[in-house]
Image (tube, helix red, strand yellow):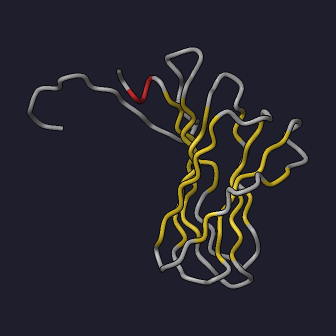
Amino acid sequence: MNLSKNTKLTKVKALSSSAGTAINSDSVDMAGFEGVMFFGRVASEDSGNSANVAQSDDDVTFADLAGTKVVTGDDADSFLIDIVKPTKRYLRCEVNRGGTDTIVGDIYAIQYGARVAPTSQGATIDAETHISPAEGTA
């Protein structure tokens, strides 16, 4: 099995270093996928920093998913939230920066369980697949 042909990787939010306001990622359309993992990095510690996932039927009005909150404890901690079989079509990651200036690195989504493969990667992902490549100059 080739992982890159059976998943879709998308950068859903670029690095953000402004004030302590919440950050909402771009949404992912779950049509044709069984699940999604959101992951990213919070570069500076604050007890109020957390990430969670919200869902929507219409890609406009989002509601938090119960129990998905992950608190990032230490500087440079990463978070990962995996949602399997969501009940609505659109999902996004939301990062609460606890009201303080906190740098949040890029946020990515890996959609998996594609009903139709191969899948294509997100627009900002440059990807290649190699099977048993020979040694030599890259």
Total residue callouts: 0
> Which residue is at the front of the view, 138 or 96?
96
> Which residue is at the front of the view, 136 or 53?
53
Q: Residue furthest left?
A: 135
The x, y position of residue 90, in whole percent, is 77, 38
Task: Residue at 72%, 64% (x, y): give it.
Answer: 23
Relative to 110, 32 lies left or right: right
The x, y position of residue 71, in whole percent, is 60, 70
> Which residue is at the front of the view, 3 or 104?
3
> Which residue is at the front of the view, 18 or 78?
78
Task: Residue at 63%, 26% (x, y): give it.
Answer: 33
Relative to 37, 59 lies left or right: right
For residue 40, what is the image quadrant?
Answer: bottom right
Q: Quick check: 82 above or below 3?
A: below
Relative to 136, 119 lies left or right: right
Quadrant containing the C terminus in the rendered view? top left
The x, y position of residue 134, in whole percent, is 11, 26
Q: Quick check: 28 above or below 98?
A: above
Task: Residue at 63%, 55% (x, y): give it.
Answer: 13
Task: Residue at 56%, 44% (x, y): give it.
Answer: 37
Relative to 121, 135 lies left or right: left
Q: Quick check: 38 above or below 112?
A: below
Q: Residue furthest top?
A: 116
The x, y position of residue 61, in whole percent, is 90, 47
Quadrant containing the N terminus in the rendered view? top left
